[in-house]
Amino acid sequence: MLLERQSGFQVIGEAADGREAVTLVEYRRPEIVLLDVSLPRLTGLSAAREIVSKNGGTGVLFVTTQTDEAYVVEAVKAGARGYVASGESSSDLVPA
């Protein structure tokens, strides 16, 4: 809802798990995809790797409760362009 209220953003889909996210990105071709590290069926990290390898023009941003540095490092290795802790202020999401 936060992004839908922002100028320049349009939410074009939502996925219930990592596998669905990969499929949806291939179908919809968004500029940005928001992922959580802890997704069912296919982790967010694995989904990010697939999305980046198949859809290089799609940016991946993690929005997650996982704040351990190891997750941040793995997210960057997976091709993420950003990582925002979901407990942070909602004003941090838009610039990210």
Image (cartoon, grey):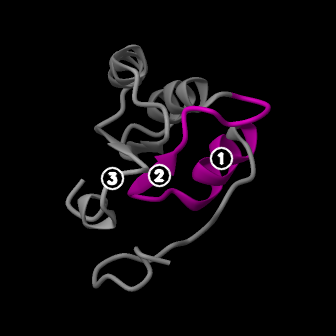
Label 2: which residue? Answer: 33
The Cα–Cα distance between marks 1 and 2, rounded to whole angstroms, is 9 Å
For residue 57, side relative to residue 1 (left or right):
left
- Mark 3: give few (<14), some (14-19) or many (20+) Cα within 10 Å: few
The Cα–Cα distance between marks 3 and 2, rounded to whole angstroms, is 19 Å
User: At numbered mark 3, what does the secondary structure look like: helix, strand or loop?
Assistant: loop
Q: Residue at x 29, y 79 (%)?
A: 8
Q: Identify the image quadrant of residue 69.
A: top left
Residues at marks 1 and 3 touching, judged by CB atoms closer than 8 Å: no
Label 1: which residue? Answer: 21
The residue mark sitting in front, 1 or 3, is: 3
The amino acid beneath tag 3 is: Glu
Residue 92 in magenta stretch: no
Q: Earlier in the sequence, mark 1 or mark 3?
A: 1
Residues at marks 1 and 2 touching, judged by CB atoms closer than 8 Å: yes
User: At numbered mark 2, what does the secondary structure look like: helix, strand or loop?
Assistant: strand
Label 3: which residue? Answer: 88
Q: Measured along the vertical axis of the image, is residue 1 above or below residue 55?
A: below
Q: Earlier in the sequence, mark 1 or mark 2?
A: 1
- Read off the magenta span: 19-42
What is the x, y in percent for residue 10? Answer: 44, 77
Q: Measured along the vertical axis of the image, is residue 5 above or below residue 29?
A: below
What is the x, y in percent for residue 68? Answer: 40, 21
The Cα–Cα distance between marks 1 and 3, rounded to whole angstroms, is 24 Å
What is the x, y in percent for residue 55? Answer: 47, 40
The amino acid beneath tag 2 is: Val
Q: Residue furthest left?
A: 95
Q: Earlier in the sequence, mark 3 or mark 2?
A: 2
The amino acid beneath tag 1 is: Ala
Q: Residue at x 35, y 24 (%)?
A: 72
Q: Residue at x 20, y 60 (%)?
A: 95
